[in-house]
Image (cartoon, rainbow, N blue to C red):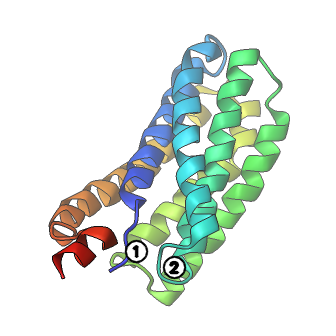
Amino acid sequence: MFIDHLTIMLVNLAAGLTLMGVFVLKFMDKDRKRTAPGFLLSGFVSLVTGLHIVFTWPLPGSYNIAFGEMAALFGVLFFVAGLAFLFDWDLLTLGIYAAFVGVGSIVIGARILSLGMTSEPLMAGGGFILTGLMAVLTLPVFYLRRFLLVRALAAIGLFGSAAIWALTGFMAYWSHLEGFAKWAPAVMRQAVK
């Protein structure tokens, strides 16, 4: 049985996307520093867990690529966004980076759908695609931020992405608590024999 920490990654991503939706609606033009701690926190958790998967490959096959690499990329993006808000850095380069991460997420989502990966391919693929689309639209939304409709539509997309990942993560917590209830570390398994 393999052990994964996708649950914390999914719920953390949901929290980060929710924070981004709130940022787009309320803090894009003022008080950006107020959102920095949340972005730094979400980015840190995603970056650490994503890099762990990238370097150790604890999941079956290509799930490591889909979940690990995207978590690391979104993690560094959220973390550096937090720094940018804290230090009032220009956001152009982050928007460009976000576009590339977003395209990667869209490609992964489409491939999850075509391969029927995960126990819920439509939800996982749709989550990757919608999250990626929101990342690709980062720069256009930022430059069109004076239009409330643009910001509202972006926030709806971000909240929708967050809802997909939150539902996926909370369902995974539900099943993991049962599935791993009798799991024991290798040291404990050897002691029983």
Q: Are marks 2 and 1 in contact (CB under 8 Å)?
A: no
Q: Earlier in the sequence, mark 2 or mark 1?
A: 2
Quarter of the picture holding the N terminus: bottom left
Q: Nearer the viewer, residue 150 or 49?
A: 49
Residue at 52% across, 38% down: 42
Residue at 45% across, 37% down: 18
**Which residue in the structure is indicated by mark 1?**
122
Residue at 20% across, 66% down: 175
Q: Which label belongs to residue 112?
A: 2
Q: Nearer the viewer, residue 186 or 111?
A: 186
Quarter of the picture holding the C terminus: bottom left
Q: Nearer the viewer, residue 156 or 39?
A: 39
- Residue 161 image point, x, y percent: 46, 51
Name, please, the residue furthest toward the top: 31
Say if residue 40 shows up in the picture. Answer: yes
Residue 93: name its quadrant: top right
